[in-house]
Image (spheres, rainbow, N blue to C red):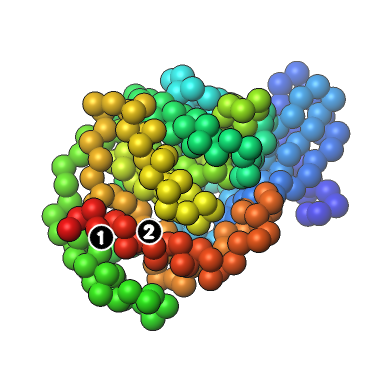
Amino acid sequence: MTEKLPDPIKTWVEQSLPSKQTIRAFEKLKGATSTTLYKIETDTDRYVLRLYDNKSWLSKEPDLAAHEAASLKTAAADHFGARSPQLINVDESGKQAGLPMILMQFVPGEVVLKPDDLDAWLKELARVLAGIHRIDADHFKWTFRRYTKPHELKVPDWTEHPVLWEKGMQIVQSREPRYKETFIHRDYHPVNVLWTGGKISSVVDWVNACRGPAGIDVGHCRDNLVCLFGVEAAETFLNYYKTFAGDRFSYNPYWDFVAYFDFVYPGPPKVYEGWNNFGWQDLTDAIITERLETYFESLIEKCT
């Protein structure tokens, strides 16, 4: 797979391309951890091929390719302040090459994890997320689900604040607050946004998009920001998001707790491979664990 694309995949890609283009080059893209991504180059254009080759994930969600294809169509149908990849073709069942796969237009931009102006970077990150949440998805098939079951949570051995964890668990085990469903990316974080000239040009990785509470997207992004920059950056992002979302968003820390447990449980926290791939080699498991614990304490304080 490192030297050439298998013939069935190559044939499917070339048959999917407009104007009878042929593949001139391809390379594996960094940053993907649950699927395999390739950049495909022809004489006239560039594309991205995603192979859904995680057997464990596919066994739980065999419709992954169909899901992402629908997400891309929905995101493309509504302007949210940046681009999403244009869907070219999808093999939902893996009939062509034994694996479900999707072919998308290559989108411009680069991952930026060490911005020159952190405040402006956080503001732009919030602006685009608020735009995503304005996408009309009333008829979107896929709906929000939690990754952790509240009543199965247990205090992990790695935390130094078991009493706080008990309080946080009680919060997510309480009655879920009412919310207005909106279109959510479900994995919005700095590695999944691309930048050009100080602005977000594209948002990628839509395989988990669904209808659900906006607070989950906000909370998940905040978890990532805490790991990279600390609690203050996560709070700045939240405040900017509130401004851009306006009356459409009513902040409730409940969703921060849900997102937090989805992010860290059962743990212990580990440095995300994507951060290393894009320039954060100085992060350690100990650093992000300390930052996440500090953040968790701040969330508890909001509820007391």
User: In the image, what residue type sits under mark 1?
Assistant: Ile
Towards the viewer: 173 or 100? 173
Q: Is residue 248 above or below residue 95?
A: above
Towards the viewer: 289 or 78? 289
Picture residue at 46% right of the left edge, 67% below the top = 290
Q: Is residue 294 visible?
A: yes
Which label number is shown at residue 63?
none
Picture residue at 76% right of the left edge, 40% below the top = 10
Which label number is shown at residue 295?
2
Picture residue at 53% right of the left edge, 71% below the top = 286
Residue 62 lies, in percent from the top left, at 47, 52
Q: Residues within 10 Å of mark 2 (few under 14, many from 20)?
A: many
Whether residues under marks 2 and 1 lie with C-beta atoms below 8 angstroms apart, the answer is no
> Relative to 290, is 29 on the left or the right?
right
Residue 167 lies, in percent from the top left, at 21, 67
> Relative to 181, is 120 on the left or the right?
right
> Relative to 277, is 238 on the left or the right?
left
Residue 156 lies, in percent from the top left, at 36, 77
Q: Secondary structure at mark 2?
A: helix
Picture residue at 57% right of the left edge, 55% below the top = 34
> Relative to 132, is 273 on the left or the right?
right
Which label number is shown at residue 300?
1
Residue 16 lies, in percent from the top left, at 68, 29
- Quadrant of the snapshot with the N terminus: bottom right
Q: Is residue 259 above or below residue 170?
A: above
Q: Mark 2 and mark 1: span between their CA atoms?
A: 9 Å
User: In the image, what residue type sits under mark 2?
Assistant: Tyr
**Residue that protrudes farthest toward the bottom in the picture:** 157
Q: Is residue 97 visible?
A: no
- Quadrant of the snapshot with the C terminus: bottom left
Q: Is residue 162 above or below residue 234?
A: below
